[in-house]
Amino acid sequence: MKRPINLFVLMCCLTHISIGQSSFTDPLEIKFKKLQDDIYLAYRPDPLRFWVEGNVLIIINDNDVVVVEGSGTPRSAQAVIAYIRQLTDKPVAYLINSHGHGDHTIGNQEYREAYPGVEIIAHEGTREYIAGRGYNYVDEIAQSTESRKKNGEEEIARLQAEGKPENKPVVENLVQYYRHDIDVRQAEYKKVTRTPPTLIVNENLRLYRGDRIIDILHIGEGNTASDLIVFLPKERIVCTGDIITEPVPYGFARNPFTWLQTLRRLAEFDFDTLIPGHGEVQTGKAYLQRFMRLFESLRGQVASATTSGLDLEGVRKKVDLSAFNKEFSGDDPVAQYYFDQYFTIPAVERALNQYKLQQGRQ
């Protein structure tokens, strides 16, 4: 949501941002951890650093390797591939994309180059997204970042003008991106070759890799209409893609109501370990249940507000998700900011649109 701001205020506020060029750090630092024997996670330490980078699961089997998610840049995918080669000389036979968004798929090209025989598995909608207009933003950023930088500086100035102490770490987060990381992102996007899936799963596929079973399933619409989950029944591990994210949820889906149905189906799986699309690995189902409570509250509050005849702005004022913001974000002002930006603002509008659509069909 754009907010008008006085240009004089903008310039004055920018002079008070204390972050210096020397404090900028590499946005593509990837770390690794062992989850179980022959199962490893590649992740970026700060899941709230913008732009986001998806988690990657590495599964080493008897004769090959299966990787879940292709990473968000060529360089981050190269780091994961280098780590795999430290672990084993077995080839990556399958690369699974949970959905089409670039932070999970842009690195596909590196696997194709490193392992020419690799099959890239995804939903048909993911193939269409990568091959079609879904990747247009990648081309746009590769060509120019000026409009994005301008919008970013306006948001930084707005937060500075508010004068709230809790805005300082949020400003630092945004300055890191708009003064440094976005240029790294542009350089990486200039290297991108669209690499869509080669093997399509629109419902389910089971891979047998020796004694290991890997189930690839479309259980419903979530963050996108084409979301796949990956379930290892013997290891009791589930990879959710962006159906689940940590520490804050995403609310960009076309239909939050069907997302709730998908969460309920996910809860039926027998797992001990949940690997979200971003953020910390979760033990058990408590975090998933928190997601479901959030979506249930969103649905109920939007329905109540819409019944009262309110427009979008009226619904935004009436819907109160602050308790959930606190539950997900704790006392972290950066997480609180992104809970609103990533969930509350988009999800309320999309839920309202879907509620009106459903009412119109009745």
Image (cartoon, rainbow, N blue to C red):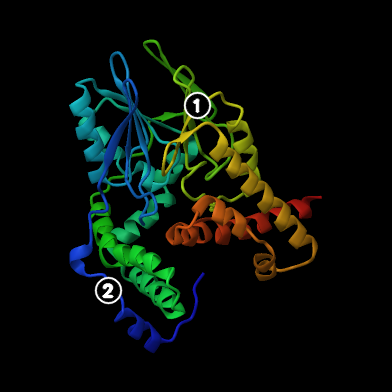
Q: Residue 194 sits in which quadrant?
A: top left
Position above or below: 104 against 272: below
25 vs 128, nearest the viewer: 25
Choose the circle earlier in sequence order: 1 or 2: 2
Image check: 69 left or right of 317? left
Q: Amino acid at mark 1?
A: Asp
Under tag 2, what secondary structure? loop
Q: Position of residue 273 (x, y in %)?
A: 47, 29
Residue at image point 28% right, 47% down = 73
Q: Which mark is residue 18?
A: 2
Residue at image point 53% right, 45% down = 223
- Mark 2 residue crowding within 10 angstroms, few (<14) / some (14–19) / many (20+): few
Q: Name the residue furthest top.
A: 211
- Residue 27 visible, this angle: yes
Q: Residue 259 sits in which quadrant?
A: top right
Under tag 1, what secondary structure? loop
Q: Position of residue 104 (x, y in %)?
A: 38, 42
Q: Amino acid at mark 2?
A: Ser
Position above or below: 284 against 128: above
56 vs 332, nearest the viewer: 332
195 vs 174, nearest the viewer: 174
Residue on which the image places disc 1: 272
Q: Position of residue 184 (x, y in %)?
A: 24, 57
- Mark 1 residue crowding within 10 angstroms, few (<14) / some (14–19) / many (20+): some
Residue at image point 27% right, 60% down = 181
Q: Which mark is residue 151?
A: none
Image check: 116 left or right of 209? left
Disc 1 to disc 2, C-alpha distance? 44 Å
